[in-house]
Image (spheres, rainbow, N blue to C red):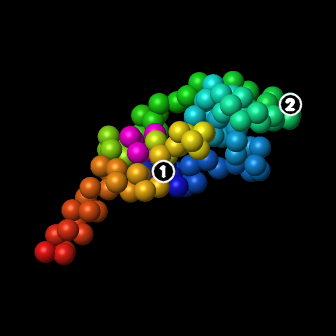
Amino acid sequence: MMAGLIFKREPFFKGKSNPDQLVKIAKVLGTHDLKKYLDKYNVELEDEYLEEIGQHSRKTWDTFINDRNADLCSDDAIDLLSKLLVYDHAERILPKDAMKHKYFDIVRDCFDENMD
């Protein structure tokens, strides 16, 4: 959701089916970390899915920044996005920690100003 908002590309991972959506994700996050995740949790994908996914390098987020969205792609936004979009749930930022991220400082500052 956040990637779609900051890159102005909704939905960001637009797959026609579950397997196709995984392909879209793998084309952005890369297949190296996907395979690490599958191995770590002993998840086996059908050969058909593995063939469809193929091999992909992780794309850098600047690949998706353009004139239409550059104003939304602050360093803090990209940092938070990088912590949210992780295959392994154990490595992904927790919601309570995400809410404490510097990206949301402006929201907290506005709230504090209105409370004074």
> Relative to 112, is 84 on the left or the right?
right
Q: Residues within 10 Å of mark 2 (few under 14, many from 20)?
A: few
> Relative to 9, is 41 on the left or the right?
right
Is residue 81 part of the magenta span, yes or no?
Answer: yes
Q: Marks 1/2: CA distance?
A: 32 Å
The x and y percentages for residue 76 are: 33, 44
Q: Which residue lies at the image location 81% right of the left edge and 34% below the top edge?
A: 44
Q: Which residue lies at the image location 40% right of the left edge and 51% below the top edge?
A: 97
Three-letter residue code for mark 1: Leu
> Relative to 113, is 54 on the left or the right?
right
The x and y percentages for residue 73 are: 36, 45
Looking at the image, the residue that sits furthest to the left is 116
Q: Which residue is mark 2?
A: 47
Of 7 and 41, the residue lying toward us? 41
Q: Which residue lies at the image location 60% right of the left edge and 39% below the top edge?
A: 88
Q: Which residue is mark 1?
A: 94
The magenta stretch spans which residues? Answer: 78-82
Q: Which residue lies at the image location 46% right of the left edge and 39% below the top edge?
A: 82
Task: Assign a secondary structure to mark 1.
Answer: loop
Quarter residue 36 falls in: top right
The x and y percentages for residue 31 are: 65, 28
**Discs 1/2, front:** 1
Three-letter residue code for mark 2: Asp
